[in-house]
Image (cartoon, rainbow, N blue to C red):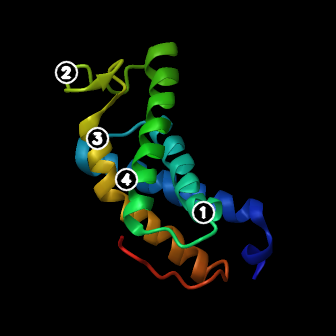
Amino acid sequence: MLLRYNKFLQYFLMFLIGGFTYGGMEIIFRGYSHISMMIAGGICFILIGLINEVYSGEISLIKQMAISAVIITAVEFVTGLIVNVWLDLNVWDYSDRLFNIKGQICILYTMIWFFLSPLAIILDDYLRYYIMGEEKPHYRIF
């Protein structure tokens, strides 16, 4: 299979899946999205998939969830600084939320990403297994 040997196509596919999933979730929950969120979602999905590459040993699902929540929050912060602060597009504003940083991120969404991240982790693992011929995933909760 072509994807098994072509890293560019693998990451491009993961970027598209992550981007459209992230954008779709925004449309479901907010009623709209922005192209910047699709780009951020694609980047997040790739980075979440790389957690297993960085940690050579088996890492627990809970630790992957915590790392994923930090990754997503960091990507949203950088995206927010570019899109909302620098370009002044005002795609979102969390200034009214507790524990926000410059209105771009807040603790509430970091917690939400923690609990939603298993969807991305498991989707990435099984896409890599079925489409890219990688090892079948197995999970350790703690």
131 with respect to 125 (left or right): right
Residue indicated by mark 2: 96
Which numbered disc, 1 or 4, marks the residue closer to the eye?
1
Residue indicated by mark 3: 109
Q: Quadrant of the N terminus?
A: bottom right
Q: Residues within 10 Å of mark 4 (few under 14, many from 20)?
A: some
Q: Earlier in the sequence, mark 3 or mark 4?
A: 4
Q: Residues within 10 Å of mark 1 (few under 14, many from 20)?
A: few
Give the residue displayed 52% in from the left and 22% down from the top. 82
* Residue 83, x across and y down, in percent: 48, 23
Residue indicated by mark 4: 24
- Amino acid type assigned to the residue bearing label 2 in the image: Asp
SS at mark 2 in the image: loop
Which numbered disc, 3 or 1, marks the residue closer to the eye?
1
Give the residue displayed 51% in from the left and 81% down from the top. 137
Check if mark 3's residue and mark 2's residue have beta carbons within 8 Å: no
- Amino acid type assigned to the residue bearing label 3 in the image: Tyr
State the separation of the CA atoms marked 2 and 4: 24 Å
Give the residue displayed 59% in from the left and 71% down from the top. 57
